[in-house]
Image: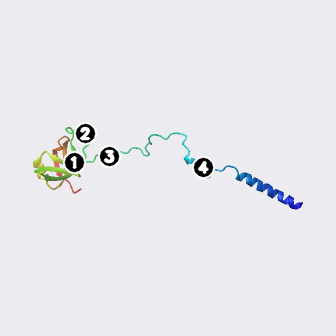
Amino acid sequence: MRFFLNLLPLGALLTSLLAFAQQPQPSQPVDPTQQAPATPPQQSTPPTFPPTAKQPPDESQPNSTETSQDTSRTFMGTIIRNRGSYLLRTGDKEYKLDDQSKAQKYAGKDVKVLGRLDKQNNVLHVVNIEVHPSM
């Protein structure tokens, strides 16, 4: 009889284990990140850093906000001769110079040209040209 009394707790344990094993269990743990968010995401992310001071314009690129006839700008590049005309080459752009006699003095040199850009005709109306150290 003592033998059966000793088996009774063991039987109760075995029964509870079987009952637990028969309960429906998900095959994989639930990933909480797969659920839809409670709030929709924001349309735009606010900037992390405060805006910095305005960067100086790229001197080889004309500023689209400037009109072509009213402001002088500085352009840096090399004076080249192409098809009988002197041009200012700035990177991959070339601008015809309206004052060919001034440009001739600086042929083949790295220069800084102060002038107004006529965007329609791609012509720089030269105010001043000076030699600039190699870029």
Mark 4 is on which residue type? Val
In primary-sequence order, the first of circles 2 and 1 is 2
Question: Across the whole image, how many numbered discs are drawn on residues?
Answer: 4
27 with respect to 98 (left or right): right
Residue drawn at 80 percent across, 54 percent down: 12
Residue drawn at 72 percent across, 52 percent down: 20
Instruction: Tell me the crowding category of disc 4: few under 14, some 14 to 19, or many 20 or more residues within 10 angstroms, Cα based.
Output: few
In primary-sequence order, the first of circles 1 and 3 is 3
Mark 3 is on which residue type? Gln
Cα separation, mark 4 vs mark 1, equals 63 Å
* Residue designated by label 1: 75
From the image, state whether disc 2 or disc 3 is nearer to you.
Answer: 2
From the image, state whether disc 4 or disc 1 is nearer to you.
Answer: 4
* Residue designated by label 3: 55
> Which residue ends up furthest to the front in the rendered image?
22
* Residue designated by label 4: 30
76 with respect to 103 (left or right): right
Secondary element type, mark 3? loop
Instruction: Tell me the crowding category of disc 2: few under 14, some 14 to 19, or many 20 or more residues within 10 angstroms, Cα based.
Output: few
Mark 1 is on which residue type? Phe
Residue 39 image offset from top left, x and y in percent? 53, 39
> Residue 66 shows which numbered tag?
2
